[in-house]
Image (tube, rainbow, N blue to C red):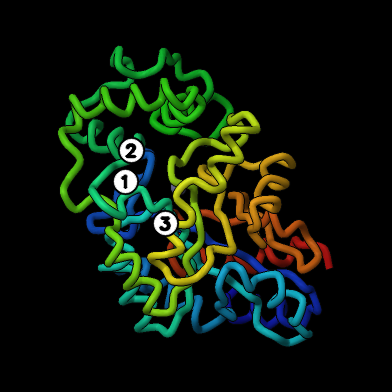
Amino acid sequence: MRLRLLLLRARSSSRRSAVCVVLHRVDAPASPPGTRLDPALAPAAFRRQVRGLARHFKLVHASALRSAAAERRRGGRIPVALTFDDDLPSHLDVVAPILLDAGAPASFFLTGATLHAPFCFWWQRFDRALERGLVLDDPRLPAFDGTTALGTRWTAVDAMGDAIRRLPPTRRDEVADALLEVAGPDPPDAGLRADQVEKLARAGFEIGFHTRRHDSLTRLDDEALRRAMRNGRQELERVVGRPLTAIAYPHGDADDRVARFAADAGFAAGFTTAARAIAADGDAFKQARIDAVRLPWPDLGFALVRMWLRAPR
Ligand SMILES: [Zn+2]
């Protein structure tokens, strides 16, 4: 079925739901599937996604999704938020101009880890090390037999990423440092400096929080979780010039406790990752985001409408 036809049918529904999309790297060249933890989407493919979304959907900031869903009436466009994580320089250099060109609002969830100096997170060093010949049974990596990938759509690279993500934070920091031996030093243009973050905010994009250390929050004890919700947030708010009211949980990891701590820390919305629509009356602190890196246009359009049609009325 043509997308236009499916949309026509979908819009005749009075569903009060929305969908949220998450993207990471938009960079040339695009990565072949399964070869990187953080695969890149080619700028041309991203431009087609943005044009299609702006044309067929109602684009809003992530924090406005639930209210846009609540206000939706029969015949109205489906509310969609486009979000980006991890403070990547390509978000300012490549993504922002394409969004502005299409008149598309978007939300950037930042850690603020690179406001003053370049720094790469462990998965970025891991991807760089893979390019330089790192093998998965390298003694610097966690012991790994690949069986976690069985029965999933994961590749061995994905499964190793998951094994590293699950390490206690201090052990994971050790792996990240050891990876530098293979990956080489973090490039001087890694991450977004304060002036670059300021430019994103000034261009009208929403800035949310992604926590300074990018730990998997469900694995932290109460004290560390409370710290993660606050550490670095004020500094980022000073740069942005307004409060950060939404949080995207690192790796999408959240449970009831994480959601409660986000509410206690004064956030108004929290985002996980899952291929699900967001209901107007759903949990504000467990809003799902679908990863769009492997969905070129118009597949992304179809996926979003079908997901939306599966949401309760
Ligand atoms: Zn992230």
Q: Residue at x 49, y 23 (%)?
A: 168
- Amino acid type assigned to the residue bearing label 3 in the image: Glu
Side of 13 where 139 appears, left or right: left
In the rendering, at what x and y percent does residue 78 appear?
65, 77
In the rendering, at what x and y percent does residue 209 appear?
50, 56
Task: Look at the numbered disc 2 and give the secondary structure of its residue.
Answer: loop
CB-based contact (under 8 Å), mark 1 and mark 2: yes
Which residue in the protein does label 1 denote? Answer: 32
Q: Quadrant of residue 178?
A: top left
Q: Earlier in the sequence, mark 1 or mark 3?
A: 1
Whether residue 262 is situated above or below residue 34 in the rendered picture: below
Side of 215 where 64 appears, left or right: right
Which residue in the protein does label 2 denote? Answer: 35
Q: CA distance from mark 1 to mark 2?
A: 6 Å
Q: Nearer the viewer, residue 18 or 147?
A: 18
Few, some or many residues within 10 Å of mark 3 (<14, 14–19, 20+):
some
- Amino acid type assigned to the residue bearing label 2 in the image: Thr
Mark 3 C-beta closer than 8 Å to ligand 1: no
Q: Which mark is residue 211?
A: none
